[in-house]
Image (cartoon, coloured by chain):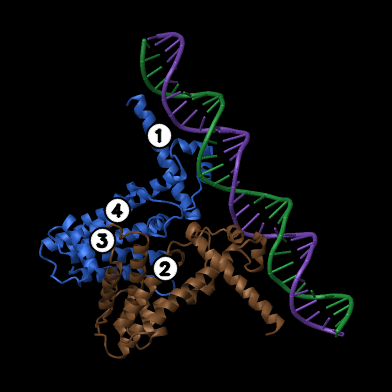
Chain colours: A blue, B brown, C green, D purple
Amino acid sequence: MSAANLRARVRAEMTDEIKAVARRHLATDGANLSLRAVARDLGMASSAVYRYFASRDELLTALIIDAYDAVGAAAEEAAASVEGALEKWLAAGHAARDWALANPHEWALIYGSPVPGYQAPQDTIVPASRVLLLLGETLATAYRAGEVPSRELPAGRYAEELGVVAANYYPDLPARAIADAISGFFQLCGAISAELFGQLNNSVDEDRRGFFEFQMRGAAAQAGLTA
Amino acid sequence: MSAANLRARVRAEMTDEIKAVARRHLATDGANLSLRAVARDLGMASSAVYRYFASRDELLTALIIDAYDAVGAAAEEAAASVEGALEKWLAAGHAARDWALANPHEWALIYGSPVPGYQAPQDTIVPASRVLLLLGETLATAYRAGEVPSRELPAGRYAEELGVVAANYYPDLPARAIADAISGFFQLCGAISAELFGQLNNSVDEDRRGFFEFQMRGAAAQAGLTA
DNA sequence: TGTACATCAGTGAACGCGCGTTCACTGATGTAC
DNA sequence: TGTACATCAGTGAACGCGCGTTCACTGATGTAC
């Protein structure tokens, strides 16, 4: 390994370490992440962090992209490890939920309230849609295998808009499939956020996983996925 | 009106004004609400605010309770103005969504990420469940009218937990009804938050109301509510 | 009705703190001849 | 191989700012006799 490569590797490691400490700080500060606090934890001058990130927002962006990629990768891996559309759908859901429970503050960062004053740059768009895309692909495969009974999407301007999306990305699928994928994804996000943000306290406390699966099965049924 | 009452009324008006300005500040600062900025906007010394709220957290709590009550009241009113379980369900959903679109930062305050370092006091619990309770009551009425076909709740520990909730609050209803009400509420929250936080950008841009209704109809169907 | 007192909204200075970002700098490491 | 130079991670002080909260106070309004 050349000296230049070594330097680059050390730099990458330091970058990772800063992000790791910053992730830990999300727990206490939320999106109010403090660069100085991160630097303090690393035992370095706050100005040194600027060698790695041009600003606080750039660090936040890196954390956001990492989070989208992490939950997306977890869901993809889980879905890939099972057979059958419904099984993949449920596996993706559980993987996303497991990741969220393990990384609640990162989940809040990407699916909670927008950070005040922070404008997400373009780089976040692609990673942001990995989980939705996974549900879409799962549903598409089931459609192509003829496993989904045809039902109609109630007419309306929104149905036309979804028809355009279908035409652009899934020309062989009806708009209904797109509607169901998005709706299922929103349901997944809603169920996880609600659980994480405390809305199940004092009603379902032991088997939240079971209740989550009930909800994801409901979304799947709505999408026409059956066992 | 006695002088004491006048004093109390002026005090109440000032309290309302502080909350109104604070609500405006939610838009820029999010939950990072600054007492000093609020006081500045009101043209008063920051210390004067302490005559009305013992701390920043207490002001936040007041905003949170007001927000829960506002969206709850809007949903209740909308549901009361129509006949039929499905109609009430949809009316409640649209009212919640309309309120959220009109007050996005308040919606984020109550249904977005928890505010870092803020612990919600007991007073928020009852107002927090108004919308969920409304869906529950709507469903209960439909059950009592024999309008909901009986379906079973897949067995599991979560089903037992929901059975306990049912036994405590709706002894004539099956656990499935509770599961559907909570699930429907989560779907409502998920759909509104997703739309508000930008997840529909570039797919459904014109008729988001129509797509929301599609989702709420899906939740209603899942709950056994038919036209 | 007039006077002494109590209440309480609001002031302004202060305490002690933290923040993001910039800048001139040091010193170690790597590169080119 | 040795030397002059370039690169660049990291320092520490500074700028200019904002924050929540406390405290002794002023002065207007209301109350009791």
Instruction: Work out whether disc 1 and disc 2 sit on a shared chain.
Output: no
What amino acid is labelled 4 in the image?
A: Gly
Q: Sequence-wise, which precedes: disc 4 or disc 1?
A: 1
Residue B84's disc number: none
Q: Sequence-wise, which precedes: disc 3 or disc 1?
A: 1
What amino acid is labelled 1 in the image?
A: Arg
Which residue carries the number 3 mark?
A: A91
Mark 3: secondary structure = helix
Q: Is residue A108 visible?
A: yes
Residue D11 picture location, percent across and down: 56, 32
Badge 4 crowding class, 10 Å Cα cut-off, few under 14, some 14 to 19, many 20 or more, is many
Instruction: Work out whether disc 4 and disc 1 sit on a shared chain.
Output: yes
Question: Quarter of the image containing the C terminus of chain A?
Answer: bottom left
Answer left or right for B48 relative to A191. Answer: right
Residue A190 figure quarter: bottom left
Residue at the bottom extreme of this rendering: B145
Q: Sequence-wise, which precedes: disc 4 or disc 3?
A: 4
Residue B197 picture location, percent across and down: 37, 60
Q: What whole-number distance in Å separates the C-alpha atoms at marks 4 and 2?
A: 32 Å
Which residue carries the number 1 mark?
A: A11
Whether tag 4 and tag 3 are in contact, CB under 8 A, the answer is no
Q: Which chain does the residue under circle 4 lie in?
A: A
Q: What whole-number distance in Å separates the C-alpha atoms at marks 1 and 2?
A: 46 Å
Residue B77 picture location, percent across and down: 41, 81
Badge 3 crowding class, 10 Å Cα cut-off, few under 14, some 14 to 19, many 20 or more, is many
Q: Nearer the viewer, mark 4 or mark 3?
A: 4
Badge 2 crowding class, 10 Å Cα cut-off, few under 14, some 14 to 19, many 20 or more, is few
Q: Nearer the viewer, mark 1 or mark 2?
A: 2
Q: What whole-number distance in Å separates the C-alpha atoms at marks 3 and 1?
A: 36 Å
Mark 2: secondary structure = helix
Instruction: Work out whether disc 3 and disc 2 sit on a shared chain.
Output: no
